[in-house]
Image (cartoon, grey):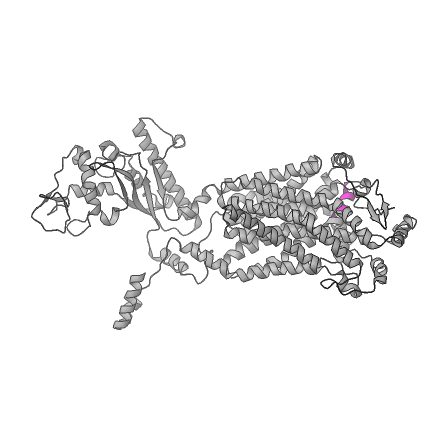
Amino acid sequence: MKNFTLLQTNLRKAGKYNELANFTVYYSSERSIQDELNRQSRSDILTIAISYTVMFLYVTLTLGHIRSCRTLFIDLKITIGFVGVLFVLLSVVSSIGFFSYIGIPGTLIIFEVIPFLVLAVGVDNIFIIVQHFERLSLTNTKDDEEEDNGEIEDIRNRKSNIDLVSYHIALTVSRVGPSILLTATSESVAFLLGSLTPMPAVRVFSLYAFLAVFIDFLLQITCFISLLALDAKRQYKMRADLCCCLQQNPNNQLQSSTTNNSQGLLYQIFSKFWTPMVLGNYILRAILFCSFIVLTCFSFSVIHRIPIGLDQKLSMPKDSYVLNYFHGLETYLSVGPPVYFVVQDNYINYTSIQEQNLLCGSAGCSQSSLLVQIGQALRQPNKTYLAQSPSSWLDDYFDWLQSSSKPPCCRINNETGEFCPATMNNTDCIKCPITPVDNQRPDPKDFQKYLRYFLIDNPGEKCPKGGHAAYKDAVQIFDENTTNSRVGGSYFMGFHSVLKTSHDFIEAMKSANTISNNISRVIMAEKHKKFYETNQLKDYPVFPYSVFYVFYEQYLDIWHNLLLNLFYSMSAVFLVTCLLLGFDFHTAIIIIVCVYMIVINMLGVMYIWHIELNAISVVNIVMSVGIAVEFCAHIARYFAVTHGINRLDRARKSLSEMGSSVFSGITLTKIGGVVVLAFAKSQLFQVFYFRMYFALVVLGALHGLIFLPILLSYYGPSNEDEEKIRQHLPSIIVLPITTDDTEVNNTNLSDDLFSPSSRTFPLPN
C-alpha cells in the first residue's frame, strides 16, 4: 500500500492523470476486521449511553407512588431509585474489577450485555420491594378497620408511624425476600454452571454475569432495604425527597397517608382489567394457551434453519475501507483466501522415498498422496471450495535438483563448496554432485544437504524453480549437529475459491478439514500398516489453516456449545427452584417450561428476523435465561404460597399482585432503552442488540403475564400441594418491636405472612 501511494504521488507530479485514473486498490489485513469492529463499537457509545440513561431516568422517576399534588415532593423516590440503579452499576463494576484482577480479561460483549442483564434483574427486584412496601402502607381501608373493631386506628393513635416502619420492612422482606432469593440464586448458579462451556466468549460472560448478579442481590437485600427504611421514615415525617431539610406540616401526615388509598395506576390496570381479560373467559384462556403452544412448535420447527456465522459486511461501518475490499474480492478475483495444508513435525521422514511419495504429486508418487487428494478435490469446487492446487516445495525441489537448464539450478563452487546462485557467472561453479536413487530422487544425505540451497535460491529466468520466494518459510529445518540436519514441519499452500457469505467460509473450513483428515488417515495407515477410519485417529499429521479459520472455528460446534450451556443453566434453575420452594417439583417444572418456551421462541425470532447464530447471539440467548426467570419466578412462587378457592382464583391473585411489579420493573424499564438502540449507526447493534433485546422483552412479558397465569390456572399445584410446601419452608421469625419502652410481641404471624392476598396486614398488639 505504501508503494502504491508513492506511485500515485509520482504520477501526479508527472501530470499523468489518465494513468492514475486506471488504478484502484482495495486492501485489507488480518487485523482489519477486528480494528473496524472496535471502531464501530466506539461510534455507538453515545447511543448506548442514551439507552441506559433512559432506563435510569424511568426507574428514578416512576418508583414512587404519588398520593396527591400536595405531597408530590414527599412521595417522590428519586433518591432511592438512583441508589438502586447505583447498586446495579456497582455490582457490574465489582465483577469487572474482580475478574480483571485475577487475570480473566473482559470482552466487548461483556461491557454491552452485562449492564443490560443486571439492570433487568436489579430493577425488577427494586420495584417489587418498593411497591410491596407501599401497598402494605396503603391497604387499610375503613372496611378493614371495622373488621378489626378499630384496632388499627387505636394503634395509630398510640404509636407513631415511624415505629411501624421496621415492622413493615420486616413484613415486606418476609413476603418478597424469598422470591428475590429464588430468582437471584437461580440466575447466579445458572451463569456459574454456564461458565463450564468451552466457548470462550460465553464462558467469560457467564463468569462476569454470575458475580454481578450475586453482588447486586447482596446489595439489595442489605443496603437497599436499610435505605428504604430510612426513606420511609423521611416520608412519614413529611420531609421532601432530595432535600430532607424541607418539611410539610407533620400534623397532616396521618390524613395524607390514609385519605388516598390508591394502589397505583398499573396495579389497578392489572387487577381490574388485565387479570379479568386474561383469566376471565375460559374460551379465551384456551385460545391463548393453544396459541402459545403453536408458536413454540413453529419456533422449534425452524430452529435448524437459523444461519450460522457473522456477516462481515454487517459488522463493518458503512464507510469502512474493508467493504470496498470485499466488493473488489467478489467482483474481480477468481480465488479467495490462501489455505495451508500443514504437515506436522515428527510424522514424515522426508529423506525416505516411501514417505516422500505420501506427499508429492509428480510421477512415481502415491495415488492417494496429499497433492493427489487435493487435486481430486479441485474437480468439485462447489463442494470443496478449492480454486487452485497447492504449490509443492517437494516437487519443485526435485525439479530444481534435476534441472537440465544451462547453467543448472543446483551448482556449487568447486573450490570452496559454497552454493552458486543461477544468476552467478563463475567458471568454478559446477553442477551439484547428486547420487540418484529410485525415480531419480536424491539419497538422504544429498536431500538434506541441498535443501538449504534450494530455499535460498531466488527464482529467475534461468532457474524459475528457485525456492526462496515461495518456500522460504514453508519448510522448517532443525540442525541436529554441526553436519546433519532434518526437516521438521512444512506446508503446502493453495487457495480457496471466492467466499462471500458466512456459510461459504464455514463450509470451506469443513471441507479443508475433511481433506486433511483423509490425508492423515492415509499417512497413518502407511506408517503403521493398518487401515484407519477417520474417527479412529488419535493423531493428525496434517491439518489445514487459513487466516479466517481463527474466526470461524467457533461455528463448527456452536450448536453443541449453545445446547450444553442451556442445559447447564436450566438444570441450575430447576434444582435451585426445587430447593428454595421446599422441594416443590410441580412449580419448578412450570417455571422451567416457561423459561424453555421463551428461549425456543427467541430462536424462532432469530430465524424470522434473519439473525445469525454466533458468539454475540449465543451470549444473548444465555442471558435470556436469566431474564426469563425474572418474568416467571415471582408470579409462580406467589401462586405456590397463596391461599385460594381453586387454581384459577390463586392465578388471578398472583397476576394482580405481582404482574404490575414485573411489568413496570422489567418490561417498561427495558422498552425505553431498547427502542433507543434502533437508532444506532451500527448495523451490528441494530440486529444483535435492538432486535434480540426487543424480542426478549416482548416474549418475556407475553409468557410471564399471559401464558404463565393460564398455565398455573390449569396445571398449577393444588391447595393440598400448597400446604405441603408451607410445611417444608423454613419458619419465619419476627423480632419484637419496642415502642416507647413498651415491648410489642408479634406472635402467630406465619399464617399472615403466607397470605399475601389478604387486604389487611397484621399490626402489633
Closer-to-camera residue (15/55)? 55
Count the labels in the image: 0
Provide residue 125's location: percent of width, then percent of height: 68, 50
Q: Which residue lies furthest to the front in this view?
A: 741
Q: In this view, does 630 lie to the left or right of 539?
A: right
Provide residue 727's location: percent of width, then percent of height: 77, 34
Closer-to-camera residue (372/99)? 99
Q: Residue furthest right?
A: 149
Asked if residue 699 lies in the magenta stretch, the reply is: no
Q: Is residue 20 left or right of residue 738?
A: left
Q: Is residue 531 above or below residue 611?
A: above
Look at the image and give the residue range highlighted in magenta.
645-655
Closer-to-camera residue (48/532)? 48
Residue 480, quarter of the rendered image: top left
Asked if residue 647 lies in the magenta stretch, the reply is: yes
For the stretch drawn in magenta, the main secondary structure is: helix
* Residue at image point 31% right, 27% down: 528
Q: Which residue lies furthest to the left in this view?
A: 427
Res 613 seen here? no
Res 263 seen here? yes
Provide residue 409's location: percent of width, then percent of height: 15, 46
Q: In which quarter of the image is the N terminus?
A: bottom left
* Residue at image point 29% right, 65% down: 6
Q: In this view, does 568 lie to the left or right of 718?
A: left
Provide residue 177's location: percent of width, then percent of height: 72, 45
